[in-house]
Image (tube, rainbow, N blue to C red):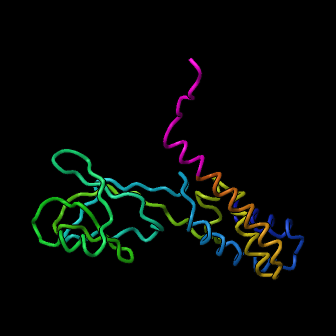
Amino acid sequence: MNRGDLEQGIIDYMKRPDLAPVTPLFITQATARIAQRLQARANEVYLTGQAYTDSTFQLPSDAERLRSVVTERNGRKVILRSLNDEAAARYSTPGSGAAVGYQLRADTLYLFPPGSGVLDIGYWQRPAELSTATSTNKVLDAHPGLYLFASLIEGYIYIQDDDMAAGMANVYLAHLEDINYNERRRKLGSVPAMGAA
């Protein structure tokens, strides 16, 4: 499916060809809606060996949500934790060892204690905007139904059909949760079933 197919799907489902000029708006709003909660391979990014200096690291512009921050300490990988202001203050002395935590402010990671090093960063990527130049993205390729349902929510909100918007929201959320659940299962691998001996 590409952007043109998606626009036609919205028009066909809603039976409203008069909405053709505003379907790109529905798709833009759907992209933002999807970015807020999707946690799937299609929008998962890992950056390894990212150097940071002066205790800061600028996240890429397509980062929607941070997933993990990992560094190496004494030859072992260590997951850094998010620190509140009080905990960050305890680790604010420069040169007091390898990073143990971070604070995320806007799109910049501040690492504590201050210093420099190397990070592996995982984040959920904001899907690329669909346009005439970019007719598809990884999320649309992997989950076209999700895009359609999210776009239909926006379409029904636009025509002020609250009942259909609520119904589509339920379908969208069920589809989204199913995708996220299956992704979590994939990451955990198969777990053997408990059976009678």
Q: Residue at x 25, y 54 (%)?
A: 71
In the current view of this chain or complex, which residue is farthest to the front? Answer: 196
- Extreme-left residue of the structure: 95
Tell me the quarter of the image containing the C terminus. top right
Residue with the most extreme top position? 197
Instruction: Examine the rendered structure and indicate whether residue 119 appears above or below residue 17.
Output: above
> Which x, y percent locates residue 138?
58, 57
Task: Say whether residue 77 is magenta.
Answer: no
Residue 146, picture quadrant: bottom right
Q: Magenta part of the protein: which range? A: 181-197
Which quadrant holds the N terminus? Answer: bottom right
Residue plotted at (56% across, 67% down):
35
Magenta includes 193? Answer: yes
Point out residue 143 in the picture as x, y percentages from the top left corner: 66, 55
Relative to 66, 2 lies left or right: right
Q: Nearer the viewer, residue 1 or 169?
A: 169
What is the total number of numbered labels drawn onto the structure image?
Answer: 0
Q: Residue at x 80, y 77 (%)?
A: 162
Residue occupying image coordinates x 55% and y 43%: 185
Between 109 and 128, the residue placed more toward the observer is 109
Residue 114 percent location from the top left of the image? 17, 69
Quarter of image, res 193: top right
Q: Is residue 165 left or right of residue 63?
A: right
Q: Is residue 58 left or right of residue 98?
A: right
Going by the image, does 168 lie left or right of 143?
right
